[in-house]
Amino acid sequence: MDAALGRAGKKHELIFYRGLDHDLDDSAARTDLLARSAQWLAAAMPAK
């Protein structure tokens, strides 16, 4: 997906959490993921 978004010229960011699977058992990684998601949503859909 990263490559496809890049080819399409779409703004994106790929984050790797080394040693973790999709379930993100690590609290710090999960917190980071949620914070990044919230920042992205706030930028993509600002409050009116």
Image: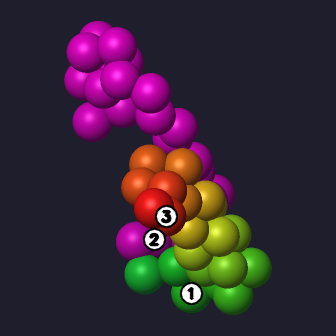
**Label 2 packing within 10 angstroms: few (<14), some (14-19), many (20+):** few
Answer few, some or many: residues within 10 Å of disc 1's Cα (few below 14, many 20 plus, some between 14 and 19): few
The reply to whether residue 22 is in sight is yes
Q: Quadrant of the N terminus?
A: top left
Compare residues 42 and 20 and report the one nearer the observer: 42
Q: CA separation, marks 1 and 2? A: 8 Å
At a point 25% along the width and 15% down the height, the residue shown is: 8
Q: Name the spot of residue 40 as percent of width and height, x first.
A: 52, 54
User: How far apart, in angstroms, are the residues tagged by discs 3 and 1?
Assistant: 32 Å
Q: Which residue is mark 1?
A: 25
Mark toward the start of the polypeptide (3 vs 2): 2
- Relative to 9, 13 lies left or right: right
SS for dot 3: loop
Question: Splitting the image into 4 quarters, where does residue 26 fall?
Answer: bottom right
Q: Is residue 15 above or below residue 32?
A: above
| Most foreground residue, 23 or 42 | 42
Residue sitting nearer the eye, 39 or 14: 39
In the image, residue 8 above or below residue 22: above
- Residue ID for mark 3: 47
Please tell me whether the stretch drawn in magenta is mainly helix, strand or loop. loop
Q: Which residue is mark 2?
A: 21
Q: Secondary structure at mark 2?
A: loop
> Range of the magenta residues?
1-22
Q: Nearer the viewer, mark 3 or mark 1?
A: 3
x%, y% of residue 25?
Answer: 56, 87
Residue at left 45%, top 71%? 21
> Alpha-carbon distance for marks 3 and 2?
33 Å
In what element is the residue under mark 1? loop
